Amino acid sequence: MNAGVAALSANASRLATISDNIANSSTFGYKRVETDFHSMVTTNSGGAYSAGGVRTTSQRMIDQRGSLVSTNNSTDLAVRGRGMLPVVRSSQIASGTNEMLLATTGSFRTNEQGYLVSESGLVLMGWPAQSDGSIPNLPRDTSAGLVPVQLSVNQLSGSPTTQMNLRMNLPATATDAGSPGDTQPLSVEYYDNLGKSENVEIELIPTVPATGSSNAWTMVLRDTASGGAVIGEYNLTFDDNRTSGGTLASVTAVSGGAYDPATGSFVVNVAGGPMEINIGQIGDSNGITQLSDTFAPVSITRDGAAVSTMTSVEVDENGYVYAFYDSGVSRRVFQIPLVDLPNPNGLTALDSQTYAPSRDSGTYFLWDAGDGPTGDLVSFAREESTTDVASELTDMIQTQRAYSSSAKVIQTVDEMLQETTNIKR
């Protein structure tokens, strides 16, 4: 009878997990629970067998992955492969505790404070980027460097220009004897420390020799923010040999910062501070060239951005959070790492499909998405429940039959005891 009672309890436990799995078959990020049976054997003595019964253990299969479904929200996130998202409950942000929890998917949207929060009150966590978009070197075996992802949606943002790349072709015919020596003007916009638009006015003056070709130019740079003052003057000469004809042969600074041949750059001081200008290395065909008879600015790029308002946010497969502004520029503002543990199934399950590290799960490590054992991060997607309703219903039928059989065993033992009692009669 004790074995039959144990069987009833075991099958009731299995039915509880089955009902929980079916109830959460449409819950995003739900991980099904699996119940296993284990026999209990007592010592046999004198050739008689004593039934020990059965016991159960339940385990949530956190390492199983559900299918990904697409959505129309850029901050709906799911992990494709191994790894979990770091989150924190919104109620803990005010207290400053920020105890890290883990989730495999979530639909995050900005709240009134700009935090990315899910419907269940989970705030996404990440590493904040520096002003240049780089991520600082932070510890990976602790959550101390993680902060709640907060986006300043309604605030203006801008960044000054500190670096500029100039790629252009100068007409070789302009340095021939008898050429008119026309100056080639070029104006390059940049942004000052207050986000205002200024310009570096560049004059390219050819050196016209009495005979032959000089292949030499003078480049004068003026800053409009400094009232048109000269901030740099450089003498450029170009090669005319067969192998590297048209490339820079030498750069000599008359004023301004010295030219660095290792980087192809020099530094000038505009009104807001130093600015690095790259014109290409010596002998590099991708730098400033002197070919043919046409002046052509090939490529002019610079960093910095005008003051603008954030319009949207997107997360790439490496976990980088980019903010897009109405000026057309984008900026990296956060990185979301993926948390990996030796035994994901050993995590402590909590409400809202969240999990907490435990002794059984092992120590965690924060990886860049796509590195090490982790998968990548998918935006515009959510992970479905791992419950297979057909399998659960089949298990329910088996459990029901096993429960009925166990009840029959108890009924049979009761009848046997009744017969034993009737012997005395």
Image (spheres, rainbow, N blue to C red):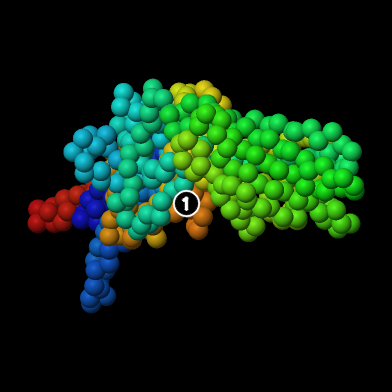
> In front here: 335 or 418?
335
**In the rendered image, is residue 119 in sight?**
no
Q: Position of residue 193 (x, y in %)?
A: 44, 33
> In front here: 23 or 407?
23
Q: Kindly identify the residue that appears in the image at 77 percent across and 47 percent down.
A: 216
Q: Kindly identify the residue that appears in the image at 27 percent across and 63 percent down.
A: 40
Q: Position of residue 246 (x, y in %)?
A: 82, 49
Instruction: Say left or right for 319 vs 165.
Output: left
- Mark 1 crowd level (few <14, some 14–19, many ≥20, 10 Å Cα): many
User: Where is residue 113, by image quadrant?
Assistant: top left
In the displayed structure, 141 sits above or below 35; it is: below
Q: Position of residue 295 (x, y in %)?
A: 79, 35
> In front here: 368 or 339?
368
Residue farthest toward the bottom in the current orientation of the protein: 46
> In front here: 70 or 326?
326
Quick one: quadrant of the N terminus?
Answer: bottom left
In the displayed structure, 119 sits above or below 383; it is: above
Q: Position of residue 331 (x, y in %)?
A: 49, 36
Q: Which residue is mark 1?
A: 368
**In the rendered image, is residue 91 in sight?**
yes
